[in-house]
Amino acid sequence: YQVLNFGMIVSSALMIWKGLMVVTGSESPIVVVLSGSMEPAFHRGDLLFLTNRIEDPIRVGEIVVFRIEGREIPIVHRVLKIHEKQNGDIKFLTKGDNNAVDDRGLYKRGQHWLEKKDVVGRARGFVPYIGIVTILMNDYPKFKYAVLFLLGLFVLVHRE
Amino acid sequence: LRKNVEDFTGPRERSDLGFVTFDVTADILNGKNNFCSIFDWNVKQLFLYLSAEYSTKNNALNQVVLWDKIMLRGDNPRLFLKDMKSKYFFFDDGNGLKGNRNVTLTLSWNVVPNAGILPLVTGSGHVSVPFPDTYETTKSY
């Protein structure tokens, strides 16, 4: 029974996550802020809630989470400039609030603009600090195992 | 909210570069009937930005942030900025600034809460900045 119960918890969590992905239109509807480049608005460890609906146009001032081609780490910065064509093709430039210069230096060699395909989502809401747990788990694998162990223990104990 | 500007364009490589100077007078505490402040208990900061929006032959919509400011809760909520130069280079993607009569400047802000939704608000009132038909060759910037 415990195995089934555990399976139920895992699959419910998965369903919720996938459901969130569909509703928000983003492949990563919740992200953790990894750097201080958006301070004082966001700090390392803050959790951001994203949407990525195609109907939402990208406009300056918005906070976007994007990935640079070939790189895994998502970056959370603000849109500084946009140039959009009649047919909806858009190219835009970003900059971190806490950075002195725009992100051109971060983009791929020869890349001057970001496009819709680079966007993971738009930040719509956030909760501070909570994401610190994922950062800790990443930086200190022992911590991750401890957390998983405790979770497992909790599930077992709870059943009785 | 009021803005006044002067302007001239300069060619840089192959794209138009616009220079705009402006004044910003803003009172973020809006005092109407009920004196309600935007800075309530859940507002950590306001990210203000002045953006120029216009259309060109190349691109149906262009938006360029010219200037931004972070206003933290507790900072003076009144802005009296005069003769400000734009913080960021106002490059067009092409030569669409020359003779463009329809460049609109708007002040907007992103409300950053302590926790919760991140709304973007556009200020009421905007200023139109017509760009001249000729390029300025002397750099008096």
Image (spheres, coloured by chain):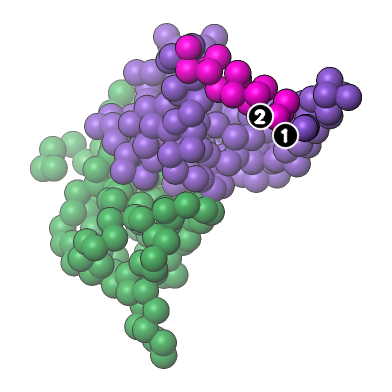
Chain colours: A purple, B green
Question: Would residue B135 be found to the left or right of residue A125 on screen?
Answer: left
- What x and y, as percent, mark residue A32? 50, 31
Range drawn in magenta: A142-158
User: Does A36 appear above or below B39?
Assistant: above
A133 lies above or below B120:
above
**Classed neighbour count for the residue bearing mark 2: other residues with Cα under 10 Å, few (<14), some (14–19), many (≥20):** few
Q: Residue furthest front?
A: A160
| Relative horizontal placement of residue A56, taking residue B10 as reference (left or right) | right
The numbered dot on residue A154 is 2
Magenta-colored segment: predominant secondary structure = helix
Residue at point 60%, 29% (across, down): A120
Q: Does the magenta stretch include residue A53?
A: no
Q: Is residue A15 above or below residue B109?
A: above
Query: What residue would you read off at disc 1?
Result: A158
Query: Residue B21's spot in the image, x, y percent?
Result: 22, 54
Marks 2,1: beta carbons within 8 A: yes
Q: Which amino acid does label 1 sit on?
A: His
Residue B84 location in percent, x, y?
18, 54
Question: Helix, strand or loop at disc 2?
Answer: helix
The chain letter under disc 2 is A
Q: Residue B139 versus residue A152: which sits nearer the camera? A: A152
